[in-house]
Amino acid sequence: MAISLFVSLKHDMDKLIFPPNFLQSLAGEPGFDEQNFTNAHQNTDAPTSIRLNPFKKAAIKTGEQVPWCADGYYLDARPSFTFDPLFHAGCYYVQEASSMFIGHILNFIKPDGEPVKILDLCAAPGGKSTLLNSAMGADDLLVANEIIKTRVPILTDNLSRWGTANTIVTNNDPKDFTRLKGFFDIILVDAPCSGSGMFRKDPAAMNEWSEGNVNLCHQRQERILADIYPCLKEGGHLIYSTCSYSHQENEDILDWLCDEFEFESLEIPVNKDWGIVETQSAKQKAWGYRFYPGKVKGEGLFAACLRKTGTQEAMGGFKNKEQQKVVAKELDLIKDYINEPANFYYFKANDDWMAIYRQHIESLNILQRNLYIKKSGVRIGKLAGKDLIPDHELALSIIINKDAVLQTELDKEQAIQYLRRDNIDINTNDKGWSLMNYEGQALGWAKLLPNRINNYYPKEIRILASAPTI
């Protein structure tokens, strides 16, 4: 009961009030400097950072680069992202800078020229999924899973904005992945944790922190990791991360993994100037990387990477065959809307046509047999006779053949009208389905009629807030 007072009394005589015993619990943690840590929380605001989408080049004003991420940038001030059409077009993702270090780990372990299958186990809202996806090519496959059903839509929306066709979104418990023996080359477990690393950015997280909750999180993390161990192939990599400072959720978990399973720790190269604290676990000397506000320009993070050394039974063979018969005439109509259409496998989910890179047919079949899938590749749309009713995912995808559709360029005021699903104030003699663009980047679809424009921006993601006054 009393803990709820800590947020409402965030500052008392200009001193941040942390939960009881919090600072004492961190006194022995590697690299922890209480004065520097408290000063960072009391006297500095959380920095604002974004990560550019490498698949959608746009003119975006940025500031200093995040040292460990080539596409990451700090902003001098926090703008209203809600009213930036380029945000809705998927040209960048607003992501906390420390968490971008996961991409640095992936770049270090990902083999050159070899396709990989990656699982992001606890993926919503999608920041780390889009980060991983940015380093992946068409031959690679990302499975982004979210355990909590109500969080799946935001994950799906963010991956749809990113625009690629090599992602599958699932909604499963970690134990469901046990069936996929040796399936994944790389697994990211950004584990549910006590959240102390987000106190500055999200002071409400202090309401949830207690030593008891740290121990409960430790137990939950062990269960999750034990469940997904069988689906990591021999020689595969596990990336483990939390937004906690507590050794019980970090170094102790690394020791447990190395004790209970067949893992070896990997040392990840870091530049000393980055301010990251390199640690080793007490027993197995497994490498970990700690981020403290005040030492890095970012929030709290712990990350580590391990390689699976034990033998792993692989899944049995699977006959690679098309899942369903499709009407050739319909397929020809669909292919007109896709760049390099021969590269894709097309299938239907209910009445919707979908496209995913051909090289992932077998993986898709396996996943459909074992998991609950919410999104596969890119949803193209429905056919009504010889006409396509295009889907929003197609508009935002990087595989769309823009030469096959009308395009209408909007200025910023018109783009905001469109994103609010308001009437759009434009004059045009064009008719039919049109991509609505801002600075050349697609926002979605509208249907141009002789006396009106039907706005087809999805109502569930439309802008509800009022525009800021200048």
Image: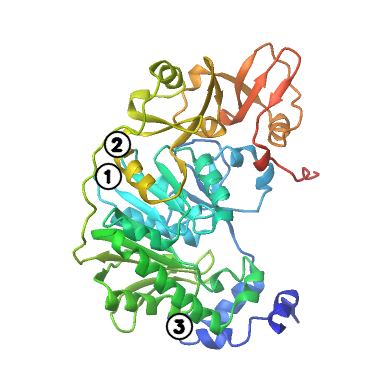
Q: Nearer the viewer, residue 103 or 371?
A: 371
* Label 2 or label 3, whichever comes before in sequence order: 3
Query: For the residue labelled by badge 3, is the local secondary structure a helix, a strand or a loop?
Result: loop
Measured in 3D between alpha carbons, the distance from the residue under mark 3 to the one under mark 1, in whole angstroms, is 38 Å
Residue 131 place in picture, x, y as percent: 44, 50
- 169 in relation to 347, above or below: below
Q: Nearer the viewer, mark 2 or mark 1?
A: 2
**Left-right relation of 402 to 179:** right
Kindly tell me whether residue 277 is visible in this rendering: no
At label 3, the amino acid type is Glu
Q: Amino acid at mark 2?
A: Gln
Tell which tag, 3 or 1, sits nearer the viewer. 1
Q: Which mark is residue 359?
A: 2
Q: Amino acid at mark 1?
A: Pro
User: For residue 256, what is the image quadrant?
Assistant: bottom left
Mark 3, Cα crowd under 10 Å, few <14 / some 14-19 / many 20+, is some
| Label 2, label 3: how far apart the Cα atoms are | 46 Å
SS state under label 1 = loop
At 60% across and 40% down in the image, what residue appears? Answer: 88
Residue where numbered disc 1 is placed: 115
Q: Residue at x 29, y 40 (%)?
A: 362
Q: Residue at x 64, y 81 (%)?
A: 18
201 is higher (above) or lower (below) than 360 = below
Q: Position of residue 57 (x, y in %)?
A: 49, 35
Q: Secondary structure at mark 2?
A: helix
Contact, mark 2 vs mark 1 (Cβ under 8 Å):
yes
Q: Is residue 1 visible?
A: yes
Q: Nearer the viewer, residue 156 or 321?
A: 321
Residue position for label 3: 29
Left or right, residue 81 beside residue 9: left
